[in-house]
Amino acid sequence: MLKLKDIISEIKYSSFIGAEETRIEKLAPAKDFQNFTSATLCWVSKKHEAIISDIKSGSIICGQDVDSSLLKDNCNYILVKDPRNTFSEIINKFFKKQDPVGISKSAKIEEDVQVGQNVWLGENVVIESGCIIGDNVKISHNSVIKSETIIEENVTIGSNTTIGGVGFGYEKDEKGFFYLINHIGNVVLKRNVEIGNNVCIDRAVLGSTLLGENVKVDNLVHIAHGVDIGENSVVIANAMVAGSVEIGANTWVAPSSSILNGLKIGSDTLIGIGAVVRKNVEDSDIIVGNPGKSIKRK
């Protein structure tokens, strides 16, 4: 039986108010406070701190500088520097579901594919010739990993995603008709990359389309051929990154934004929601609008 004393022994906190022997059976969002029991645990941000006074039962993770007048005698309070991060830490340590391991019978893997340890491949996953799959990789149902793709350890890929497809690279012949340039490069996903559902990441014409360590890609994102995304960057739903774009480390590419081909995006930048980026972006800049314009340095 999980108790508050078990939780607070594993996290960093400023102070604790309440009964350490209280058992914890359920996690819930603070907005559902009317359904809380004494065994419920939630978190409250500084922005929504006023809701604490409405919570009549349960245990609450809140900011270390919380207004003491909001606290009630029949609740427990864990005061921390960052409530959201602490709540996430608790989920990972005490409530995370066991990661699946194994290869589904319906998965199709070419004979020369290298597969590491503790790998999970969901139903109907296809891995083509020449791929390398590192340790602790998770690939969910119906995703396709095209030939020569390299996936390093601890990478997670969602469902219905294609990694290493042929890019949309065309030229005209002497008659003016478009023909497809043969893409003979690959895709490389470095350590701890996480990719959502229904994502397309195309192989390079030459060399590699590269996602650096700890890059996170949301659902419904398109990353074109030859793109290079620096470590710890985030690309969010419906974003489109065109061919040969270079994105620096620690960059935030917001939903529904578009980055035109061949551009260089500096490190520590923020591309705003729906922005259309048509020019190179310097380090630590913020780009918004269509066409994208710099509004200030971060």
Image (cartoon, rainbow, N blue to C red):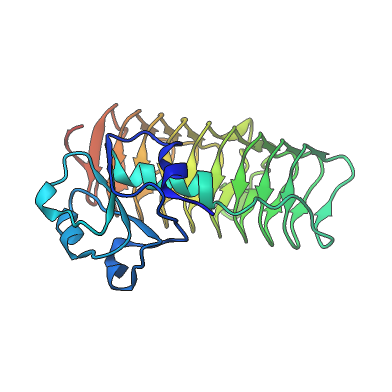
Q: Is residue 197 left or right of residue 256?
A: right
Quadrant where the image shows the C terminus: top left
Q: Residue at x 84, y 61 (%)?
A: 105
Quadrant where the image shows the N terminus: bottom right
The percent position of residue 293, horizontal first and vertical second, equals: 20, 42
Camera-nearest residue between 111 and 134: 134
Residue lying farthest left?
69
The percent position of residue 130, horizontal first and vertical second, equals: 80, 38
Residue 168 seen from this side = no
Residue lying farthest bottom?
35
Q: Residue at x 24, y 50 (%)?
A: 45
Residue 69 seen from this side = yes
Camera-nearest residue between 262 and 192: 192
Q: Is residue 122 left or right of residue 278?
A: right
Camera-nearest residue between 283 and 154: 154
The answer to whether 27 is drawn above or below residue 242 in the figure is: below
Q: Residue at x 27, y 34 (%)?
A: 14
Q: Quadrant of residue 250?
A: top left
Q: Residue at x 74, y 50 (%)?
A: 101
The percent position of residue 136, horizontal first and vertical second, equals: 69, 40
| Count of numbered tags | 0
Residue lying farthest right?
111
Q: Quadrant of residue 51?
A: bottom left
